[in-house]
Image (cartoon, rainbow, N blue to C red):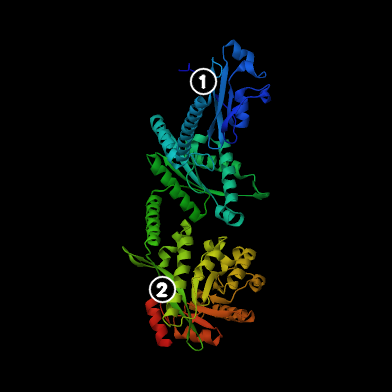
């Protein structure tokens, strides 16, 4: 039985992958076996220190009675993390069988090190935000709970502040998600210069939480927040050669006034932030009624997510008619929510929250697919449905892949595309040049474009002539007021003349009386929709109307 060899572990740099056993030759001169193992990422063996050219510390080895040396690299994935060095007083100790066992041992050690590293990484990801390195929501709540315990003993006030970056979504949409991530990372670094990292966290996509201790009064919190954000945002953020400036809003909850535990304080600060975004204020202190409103919105958001998953949304269709002939020329698809608890819910109750939460992207894509499928169903039954119009939100239009989403939806239709997209005037004006390219691409797919709610925005006539659109839809408020207000009548007449001069079709929305319909026909308006002709109805009822009029 061989006498035991002594072993030592050494730390090393990073590198490639381990190779098999190699013998030492004259190339080793001036280098130790461990150094060569690190450099070449393979096991190195010296089976007689006396029998080779001089190596580093050879005299030291010999004075210690060491005759054989083996150095084995320890790898974690593709990274070299160290070496396992073994020494023996016997020459020719490390034969092939011994090295086979030692290589297996080195592999086992490497596997154990990789397991430890993965466990450490999982533990890190469970507590820290991987992008900014700040605490995540879980760790923040734990730290905040400890801070509140100490504050309670000392009788101190603590402020919890939740801030978000205004227009981060615009940065993501225009420059890409990586640009938004760069802004978040830089902001985290700037925040850490003005506060201890233990007092900071990233608790959501663009939401940062801050703890302020030893609060004397509410104005003190406001001043500290203003100063902190001024220091963080006074200089632009450099992203890919562009200087970006950002603004923030903040919601504030105070301990113990607004809550006795970490979770309720954080929820209170988030509710205050939402109120600030609604009112436009830079920072808002929590008020009791905000929590109940926030809880209702959270409950509604969860219900809407389930509605999408369980296919609870439905489309109703409101007909559009030619004013001269009263023949049906199309129908507008309008979303409804068939809630198992509340019955048929109108869009005014949930569209705003869909847009606020970003769910409008998934729901909007569903509307496109369902409308195309409904049109295909009518065509397959021999029912003539000329065109279907769909409303597009500003969030949908801003997406880089919006044209691709539309293309995917209409690619399912065997017959030529008969889809109209209705986009409000104000949305189109947000980014005229960028939207112009998207509208051109959509028209190349056979899609027609309607400017919805025309007259309520601030469009420039010069831009209007450049946009590739097919029709204007006059906002219902003008139709409702034109018979009683001469100025509104003049405006409606002007819009019709303007549209016709640009060779655009004009649609009157919200027509509810014969007098309104007759007036619009006299003004040479082309089409109309409204309760006078039909309320929004399910596809089955629309199909009956089409059969009768077919």
Q: Residue extending furthest top? A: 63
Residue farthest to the bottom, as pictured: 325
Q: Position of residue 502 (x, y in %)?
A: 64, 79
How many residues crowd around disc 2 within 10 Å: few (fewer than 14), some, or many (20 or more)? some
- Indicate whether 98 appears above or below 263: above
218 lies above or below 37: below
Q: Residue at x 59, y 47 (%)?
A: 183
Label tally: 2
Q: Secondary structure at mark 2?
A: strand
Q: Is residue 398 above or below residue 216?
A: below
Mark 1 or mark 2, whichever is nearer to me: 1
Seen in the image, is 59 located left or right of residue 513?
Answer: right
Which quarter shows the N terminus?
A: top left
Residue 542 relative to residue 110: left or right: left
> Where residue 439 sits: x, y (%)?
60, 69
Q: Secondary structure at mark 1?
A: strand
Q: Nearer the viewer, residue 162 or 218?
A: 162
Residue at which label 2 appears? 316
Q: From the top left corner, tell me how far across and down residue 412 is, in percent.
A: 49, 71
Residue 261 is at least partly visible in this image: yes
- Residue 258 at least partly seen: no
Q: Could you say which quadrant of the image residue 62 lies in?
A: top right
Please state, as top left, top right, bottom left or bottom right, where the C terminus lies in the image: bottom left
Number of the label disc, if any, that sits on residue 7? 1
Q: Nearer the viewer, residue 22 or 151?
A: 22
Coordinates of residue 356 in the picture (x, y in percent):
47, 57
Q: Residue at x 43, y 74 (%)?
A: 374
Cα distance between the residues tagged 1 and 2 = 78 Å
Query: Mark 2 and mark 1 in contact (Cβ < 8 Å)?
Result: no
- The first of marks 1 and 2 along the sequence is 1
**Front-lying residue, 179 or 55:** 55
Residue 441, disc: none
């Amino acid at each position: 039985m061989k006498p035991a060899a002594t072993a030592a572990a050494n730390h090393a740099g990073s590198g490639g992958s381990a190779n098999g056993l190699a013998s030492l030759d004259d190339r080793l001169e001036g280098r130790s076996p461990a150094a060569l193992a690190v450099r070449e990422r393979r096991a190195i063996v010296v089976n007689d220190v006396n029998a080779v050219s001089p190596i580093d510390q050879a005299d030291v080895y010999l004075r210690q009675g060491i005759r054989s040396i083996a150095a084995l690299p320890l790898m974690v994935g593709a990274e070299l993390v160290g070496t396992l060095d073994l020494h023996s007083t016997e020459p020719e100790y490390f034969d092939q069988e011994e090295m086979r066992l030692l290589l297996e041992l080195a592999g086992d050690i490497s596997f154990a090190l990789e397991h430890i590293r993965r466990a450490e990484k999982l533990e890190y990801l469970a507590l820290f935000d991987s992008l900014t390195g700040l605490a995540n929501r879980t760790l923040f709540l734990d730290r905040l709970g400890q801070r509140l315990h100490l504050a309670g003993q000392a009788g101190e006030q603590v402020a919890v502040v939740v801030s978000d970056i205004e227009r981060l979504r615009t940065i993501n949409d225009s420059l890409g998600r990586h640009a938004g991530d760069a802004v978040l990372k830089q902001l985290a670094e700037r925040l850490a210069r003005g506060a201890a990292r233990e007092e900071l966290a990233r608790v959501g996509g663009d939401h940062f939480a801050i703890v302020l201790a030893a609060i004397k009064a509410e104005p003190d919190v406001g001043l500290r927040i203003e100063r902190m954000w001024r220091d963080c945002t006074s200089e632009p953020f450099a992203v890919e050669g562009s200087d970006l400036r950002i603004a923030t809003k903040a919601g504030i909850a105070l301990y113990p006034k607004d809550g006795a535990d970490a979770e309720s304080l954080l929820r209170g600060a988030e509710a205050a932030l939402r109120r600030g975004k609604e009112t436009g204020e830079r920072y808002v202190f929590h008020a009791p009624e905000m929590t109940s409103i926030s809880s209702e919105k959270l409950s509604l958001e969860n219900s809407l997510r389930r509605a999408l998953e369980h296919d609870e949304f439905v489309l109703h269709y409101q007909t559009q008619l030619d004013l001269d002939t009263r023949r049906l020329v199309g129908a507008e698809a309008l979303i409804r929510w068939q809630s198992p608890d509340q019955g048929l819910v109108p869009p005014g109750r949930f569209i705003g929250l869909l847009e606020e939460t970003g769910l409008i992207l998934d729901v909007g894509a569903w509307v496109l697919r369902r409308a195309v499928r409904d049109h295909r169903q009518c065509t397959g039954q021999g029912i003539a449905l000329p065109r279907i119009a769909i409303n597009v939100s500003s969030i949908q239009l801003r997406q880089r892949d919006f044209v691709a989403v539309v293309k995917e939806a209409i690619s399912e239709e065997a017959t030529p595309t008969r889809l109209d997209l209705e986009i409000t005037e104000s949305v189109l004006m947000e980014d005229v040049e960028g939207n112009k390219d998207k509208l051109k691409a959509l028209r190349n797919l056979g899609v027609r474009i309607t400017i919805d709610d025309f007259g309520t925005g601030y469009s420039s006539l010069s831009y209007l002539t450049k946009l590739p659109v097919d029709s204007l839809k006059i906002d219902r408020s003008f139709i409702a007021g034109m018979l009683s207000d001469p100025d509104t009548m003049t405006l409606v007449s002007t819009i019709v003349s303007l549209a016709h001069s640009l060779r655009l079709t004009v649609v009157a929305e919200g027509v509810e009386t014969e007098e309104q319909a007759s007036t619009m026909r006299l003004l040479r308006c082309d089409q109309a929709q409204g309760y006078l002709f039909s309320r929004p109805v399910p596809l089955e009822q629309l199909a009956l109307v089409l059969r009768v009029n077919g």
